[in-house]
Amino acid sequence: TSLYRKALEIQLKLTTSDILEFLADTESWSKSNEILDIGCGPGDLVKLLSSKFSHKKYTGIDLSEDFIGIAKKGSTANNIEFMQQDIYNYSSNITYDFIHARAVLQHLPSIPKFLEKLDDLTHSGSSVLFFDAGDADNVKTEFSPDIPSYNDFMKKITLAQKEGGGNRDCLRELEELIPSSSFKTVNSQDILTSTQTNLTKEEATSYIYLVIEVLDRIYKTDFNKDNFINELKTWYESD
């Protein structure tokens, strides 16, 4: 959990500006009062949003008992509630105005069932924001100098996720399912994030290593970690 927590902290710093910029330009967000964050982890994003939009009410749910414990321990705001819940079994006595799911879709065993659950949790004026990764076959992380083993590893993760019931190409699947659901696509964007803009070289290096370490522990891929570390070291020491 500690490695994953650290990776999530850096990931949030990497993506915060993109998320806040997107929300600032989203009319449905400005009109929303009841917010649900699915897969909230240790609650860092919920707490950040609460500090910037304190008039809204936030609910954060996650499968991990450890993460929810961390989220509750570090939360003092009276407009936030954290719960350990499986989204497929989650029910609420209210419908949410705005639902956010960051890096969740790719891990779900069934996106169609997920959309059905979202239908139960929303009303006709609700909005849902998905923020997720692309398939490693179509999305390449560029380094200078290059770290070939990183993208090779991510291709193996894509395959391992599919074999385990997940789908790293989840956003494409979602796009195909939306027309036959009760939802419609209002806005779809490809966001390119640069570690040079949002992270220090030390933070970026730590994040890259942590991503590899956490995913390798989860999926146990056939991966030459020593070669990756040497390439990462060369990248870190470059100008």
Image (cartoon, helix red, strand yellow):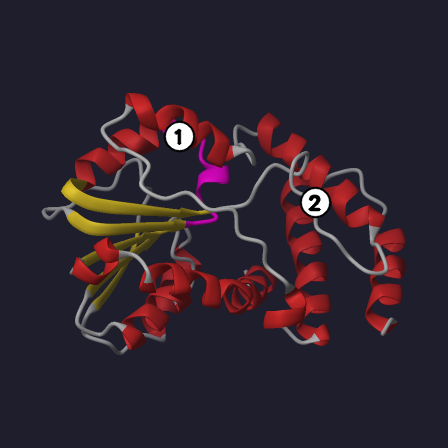
Instruction: Say the numbered circle drawn on residue 140.
Output: 2
> Whole-percent x and y of residue 15?
51, 62
> Whole-percent x and y of residue 200?
67, 76
Which residue appears at 87% of the width and 58% of the height?
A: 231
Q: Amino acid at mark 1?
A: Ile
Is 107 part of what is drawn in magenta?
yes
User: Looking at the image, which is closer to me, 51 or 32?
Assistant: 32
Is 200 part of what is drawn in magenta?
no
Which residue appears at 49% of the width and 34% of the height?
A: 170
Dot 2, how many residues are within 10 Å of its Cα: few (below 14), some (14-19), or many (20+)?
some
Q: Amino acid at mark 2?
A: Lys
Residue under label 1, please give it.
111
Which residue appears at 55% of the width and 62% of the height?
A: 11
Q: Is residue 109 above or below residue 78?
A: above
| Image quarter of the C terminus | bottom right
Q: Quadrant of residue 26?
A: bottom left
Q: Residue furthest top?
A: 180
User: Looking at the image, which is closer to me, 109 or 173?
Assistant: 173
CA gap, disc 2 and disc 1: 24 Å
Dot 1, how many residues are within 10 Å of its Cα: few (below 14), some (14-19), or many (20+)?
some
In the picture, measured across the screen, residue 124 lies left or right of residue 183, that is: left
In the picture, measured across the screen, residue 24 lies left or right of residue 106, that is: left
Image depth: mark 2 or mark 1 in front: 2
Which residue appears at 84% of the width and 65% of the height?
A: 235
Q: Quadrant of residue 182?
A: top left
Report the magenta residues as a range.
102-111
| Image quarter of the N terminus | bottom right
In the picture, measured across the screen, residue 201 lies left or right of residue 110, that is: right
In the picture, measured across the screen, residue 236 lies left or right of residue 91, that is: right
